[in-house]
Image (cartoon, grey):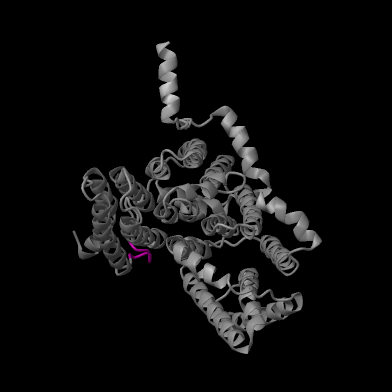
């Protein structure tokens, strides 16, 4: 075996050891200190992942310019390496946090076993080069997450949320298996690299591939908490906080990752991408508006996740695969941190609530919008002159500018010093975004980017601008006619989850034990006396 062969095999072996480490840990969980044991298992798994990714980055290139790191069962390339690092990194943080957060709770051994089992399944899914193994690992992940969501087995809401997710996951599994059947019949192989190579070699997908892509997209939509299948995500707050954070370590966002892995197949599947765009964009718009009516911090974060997953799928539908990968990684880290730090956010809010909040006027918001968009335009022009940004991505740059308007408007309303700090933040955030944009643009060829037509970008840009205008009116005119009509409906989530719950529970209701009403000693004695007579 040559040195180049060793370079190619070693990262794959190390990557394969990551799920093996989690699996062995799940089988050997300590009954005396289960969460401490789970935390100890996460550290060597993360070390193996980092070493595998580092060796993959230093692997020599083959004669055709591609790193020779493809195996029939394991693959370690850009997307898998980044996702494996994310999963293992968040595993270390979540396991360590759970040691303190769940101290003193009952059934911690079951929780630790399910936690390590879920991490083993997710990491297997991430590195798999075979779609059958990928779908099987996705199925196993769902089963382990079900155990995590039902940590408090006496809470009816937790059982209802887990039941809804279980039903959706099983329907998604059927859709994914049907998609694999069509791919096998058309391609003759279920290896990810073989399917992608077949899609690239055959311009214009056949009817079977179109149907397979549509079934794949349907399964992803079901597993990604998209409307109207989102209710379980807003109700998993009944589970412990570490579980909420773990959902972002390759559970709710894994659908976007699978689409990125199969980008060449999706590029030629215009109907499937149209479905992805319609559902993802609708979910992003509705969930963003609903999020503004939430009072609970964790519930607001849940609706934010639904919206962000919709936007992630929109990027996949537009063919911006490298931006979708960047969004997936950034959102996962941010949202996991947001859930784990929710307690400190509540304390900060209580302190801030003692002071009357600043509410920028409509005119000040307009000035802030002009300033933020001006900064974005200047930096975008500078980046475009270097060839680092494609014209099709200007819609996303406009969205970035609009997202920074609230920060700038609050700074302007507070005085010149807060305004100066807000201006520096806007400039720095825009520069950082465009820098990361350029870095991921450099790996676009590895993700087989094929951008959608300009009409797709125009629809997304116009929709997000309309969302900004509606949000601005709701914030600056909280008692106006639009707010009075829209806010009650948004607070109810447009009643979508209620409709879905009634429909599904008629077909398969959850098993929830009725609580036993407490009885007084006098009542017990009276009943015994009555029985004696």
> Where is the C terminus found, in terms of image quarters?
top left
Residue 262 vs residue 477, the one in the foreground: 477
Residue 378 vs residue 156, the one in the foreground: 156
Residue 493 vs residue 5, the one in the foreground: 493
Magenta-colored segment: predominant secondary structure: loop
300 over 128 or under it: above or below: below
* Image coords of residue 467 (percent x, y): 70, 63
Left or right: 192 in relation to 1: right
* Image coords of residue 336 (percent x, y): 44, 61
Residue at the image position 67 percent from the left and 44 percent from the top: 495
* Image coords of residue 9 (percent x, y): 25, 58
378 over 271 or under it: above or below: below
Q: In the image, is residue 191 part of the stretch drawn in magenta?
A: no
Q: Is residue 156 visible?
A: yes
Residue 404: image quadrant is bottom right
Q: In the image, is residue 67 part of the stretch drawn in magenta?
A: yes
* Image coords of residue 201 (percent x, y): 50, 52
> Where is the N terminus found, in terms of image quarters?
bottom left
Q: Residue furthest right?
A: 481
Looking at the rendering, the stretch of residues picked out in magenta corresponds to 62-68
Q: Is residue 386 visible?
A: no
Q: Residue furthest top?
A: 533
Residue at the image position 21 percent from the left and 48 percent from the top: 32
């Amino acid at each position: 075996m040559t040195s180049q062969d060793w370079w190619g095999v070693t990262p794959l072996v190390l990557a394969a050891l990551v799920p093996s480490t989690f699996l062995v840990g799940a089988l050997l969980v300590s009954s005396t200190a289960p969460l401490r044991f789970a935390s100890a298992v996460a550290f060597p798994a993360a070390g193996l992942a980092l070493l595998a990714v580092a060796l993959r980055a230093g692997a020599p290139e083959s004669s055709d310019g591609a790193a020779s790191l493809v195996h029939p069962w394991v693959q370690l390339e850009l997307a898998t390496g980044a996702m494996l690092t994310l999963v293992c990194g968040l595993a270390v943080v979540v396991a360590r946090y759970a040691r303190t957060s769940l101290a003193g709770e009952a059934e911690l051994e079951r929780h630790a076993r399910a936690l390590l089992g879920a991490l083993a399944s997710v990491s297997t899914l991430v590195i798999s080069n075979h779609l059958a193994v990928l779908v099987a690992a996705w199925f196993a992940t769902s089963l382990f997450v079900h155990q995590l969501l039902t940590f408090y087995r006496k809470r009816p809401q937790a059982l209802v949320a887990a039941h809804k997710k279980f039903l959706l996951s099983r329907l998604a599994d059927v859709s994914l298996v049907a998609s694999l059947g069509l791919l096998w019949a058309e391609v003759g192989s279920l290896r990810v690299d073989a399917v992608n190579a077949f899609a690239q070699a055959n311009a214009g997908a056949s009817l079977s591939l179109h149907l397979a892509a549509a079934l794949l997209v349907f399964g992803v939509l079901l597993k990604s908490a998209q409307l109207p299948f989102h209710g379980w995500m807003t109700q998993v707050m009944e589970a412990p906080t570490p579980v909420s954070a773990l959902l972002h370590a390759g559970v709710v966002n894994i659908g976007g990752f699978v689409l990125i892995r199969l980008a060449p197949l999706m590029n030629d599947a215009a109907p499937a991408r149209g479905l992805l765009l319609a559902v993802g964009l609708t979910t992003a718009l509705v969930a963003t508006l609903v999020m503004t009516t939430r009072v609970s911090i964790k519930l607001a974060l849940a609706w934010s996740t639904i919206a962000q997953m919709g936007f992630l799928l929109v990027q996949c539908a537009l063919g911006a695969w490298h931006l979708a990968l960047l969004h997936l990684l950034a959102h996962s880290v941010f949202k996991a941190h947001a859930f784990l730090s929710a307690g400190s956010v509540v304390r900060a809010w209580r302190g801030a609530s003692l002071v009357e909040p600043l509410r920028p006027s409509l005119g000040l918001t307009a000035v802030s919008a002009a300033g933020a968009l001006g900064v974005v335009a200047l930096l975008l022009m500078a980046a475009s002159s270097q060839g680092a940004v494609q014209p099709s991505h200007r819609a996303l740059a406009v969205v970035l500018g609009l997202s920074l308007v609230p920060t700038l408007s609050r700074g302007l309303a507070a005085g010149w010093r807060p305004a100066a700090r807000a201006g520096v933040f806007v400039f720095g955030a825009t520069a950082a975004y465009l820098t990361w944009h350029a870095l991921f643009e450099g790996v676009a060829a590895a993700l087989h980017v094929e951008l959608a037509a300009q009409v797709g970008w125009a629809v997304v840009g116009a929709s997000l601008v309309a969302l900004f205008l509606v949000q601005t009116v709701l914030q600056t005119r909280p008692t106006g006619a639009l707010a009075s009509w829209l806010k009650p409906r948004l607070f109810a989530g447009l009643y979508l989850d209620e409709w879905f719950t009634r429909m599904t529970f008629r077909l398969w209701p959850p098993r929830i034990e009725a609580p036993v009403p407490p009885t007084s000693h006098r009542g017990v004695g009276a009943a015994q006396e009555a029985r004696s007579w």
